[in-house]
Amino acid sequence: MAAALEEDEIDNDDYYSLLNVRREATQDELKASYRRLCMLYHPDKHRDPELKRQAEQLFNLVHQAYEVLSDPQSRAIYDVYGKRGLEVEGWEVVERKRTPAEIREEYERLQREREERRLQQRTNPKGTISVGIDATDLFDRYEEDYEEISGSDSGGAGGLPHIEINKMHISQSIEAPLTTSDTAILSGSLSTHNGNGGGNINLALRRVTSAKGWGEVEFGAGDTHGPLFGLKIFRNLTPRCFTTAHCGMQFSSRGIRPALTTMLARHLDKNTMGYLQWRWGTQSSMNTSIVRDTKSSHFTFAVQLGIPHTFIMMSYQYKFQDDDQTKIKGSVKSGFFGTVVEYGAETKISRHSVLGATVSVGVPQGVSLKIKLNRASQTYFFPIHLTDQLLPSAVFYATVGPLVFYLAIQRLVIRPYVRAQQEQELEKQRESSASDIAKKKQEAEAAVMLMQESVRRIIEAEESRMGLIILNAWYGKFVTDNSRKHERARVIDVTVPLQCLVKDSKLILTEASKAGLPGFYDPCVGEEKSLKMLYQFRGVMHQVLCGDTEALRIPKQSHRIDNDS
């Protein structure tokens, strides 16, 4: 049963939308909607052979939806698995004796089995590539008289600035799940700085001992530090507090160098964490920090006392609530080593890529520009050292240069590429669903034909009491942005289906895609859709525009059109 569900995606023809009921609908609500649609689509009401055939198809579809939703066991299966879940063999053996809650437990068990199988195949690779660039010659060049003396060795007066890569670091790690509680982690790194380099390789074995903690044993070797042995432990002390401890021993020609790091963390409130860390070894220190992370901001305050580094640090990040997940950030760090001020921004440039830039200005570090690209689980980092001095020109170009470059690339490369990718995905989706949409369109057109007589009677009844009359209604994609006027609106006329749903001068649509309503179909697969309606109530014109999955109840005073307009 689990294998069958794993091979096919769940196909959820929305029975709730077809019956126009809430997902929490009671049996009485289901029965009332079913009876109304049965009266509309009953084959015996039509003498024309073609209409009779179409009515029979729609009647059977409504009957199937009602049968599933009116049976508690079938409804629970449908809610979790969708229509395909009902077609899987095996339910009839066990589910007749199960409650809906037990069925959901069965689903969760099957999901866990699927996750375990996926776990065995997952390696979760992570990698970092860092390339350090020395561009100080752009701002700290020697005077021309020195260049003339040095001649060709310095490139001559007026030559191009000398920019070089002075360091590089590459690291990679993979995870190999051994069991549901045991994982092996293999990692390695290579580094080079001014012509000198080295590397190391590590193997860690992690075991989840319980829901409250895990332990990890680490072995490592390298050409610069020698063999390494470490032990790491994580433990939840209370629901609001946890601790970690890391003990390591480095073996070298100078002897054994032990190190111990412990951390205690506690939830101060819903969005705030407090940390206390103690490190003992060649660089002993004590660090305390407070981190507050909300939907719109991230704040950190930290103080460290240690040898040789003692500092105080504060950072703030603001998160814009836009599709690109843009963030701007700034930080100040001051200690025995000097003072550093950093500011920057990051934004999402594609589904799996985030680009960021940070300007670092400090004493005695100088000015640097740090560019970072996160692509899925890979990180590419480019720190560019511009000058050892605090030069306003370096700060200006480090700030304005990346911004101008990003805006140009965004307009000329990223946006056209993303737009082309979206259009390609939409085209593939349309092609794969073309036959299904054609079938839904035929069903919708047949339903509209069968509704004509009922709609005529409803309109007569509503007109007699100055009730609700749907004058025009369209469903689909509307083009309202002037910059997209070249695009063609793709909408269908749904005046008749909506008028057919009017009862006692009221129209109620639930929170479900309106494409599943009787007489509706999806005119623009994969794109955002809306429902636009012009209606009359008590002789007054009203107009409303609502989203595809937005609940709607009319008439409403707020929809009224002002006579002056």
Image (cartoon, rainbow, N blue to C red):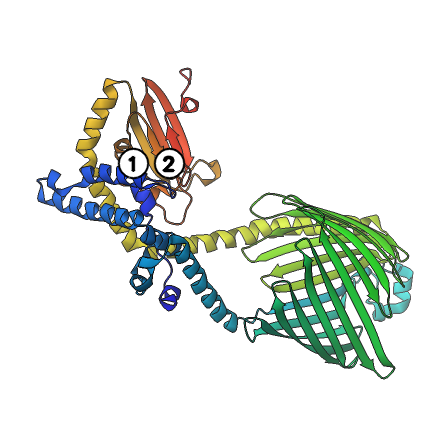
The one nearer the camera, 214 or 224, is 214
Determine crowd level at label 1: few under 14, some 14-19, many 20+ residues with C-alpha closer than 10 A. many
Instruction: Quickly name the residue at label 2.
Output: 531
Element under disc 1: loop
Residue placed farthest to the bottom in the image?
253
Is 77 located above or below residue 484 in the figure?
Answer: below
Instruction: Quickly name the residue at label 1.
Output: 494
The location of residue 469, given as percent across then percent down, is 29, 25
- For the point 71% across and 62% down, the residue is 382
Give the quarter of the figure containing the N terminus: bottom left
On residue 69, the disc is none
Element under disc 2: strand
**Labels 2 and 1: the sequence-earlier one:** 1
Q: Is residue 520 visible?
A: no
The location of residue 161, given as percent across then percent down, is 79, 62
Tell whether label 1 touches label 2 (CB within 8 Å). Answer: yes
**Which amino acid type corresponds to the residue marked 1 in the rendered image?**
Val
**Which amino acid type corresponds to the residue marked 2 in the rendered image?**
Leu
Please give left or right for residue 36 compared with residue 320 in the image: left
The one nearer the camera, 200 or 160, is 200
- For the point 32% across and 27% down, the residue is 506
**Residue 540, quarter of picture:** top left
Is 291 located above or below residue 470 in the figure?
Answer: below
**Residue 38, quarter of picture:** top left
Give the quarter of the figure containing the C terminus: top left
* CA gap, disc 2 and disc 1: 9 Å
Determine crowd level at label 2: few under 14, some 14-19, many 20+ residues with C-alpha closer than 10 A. many
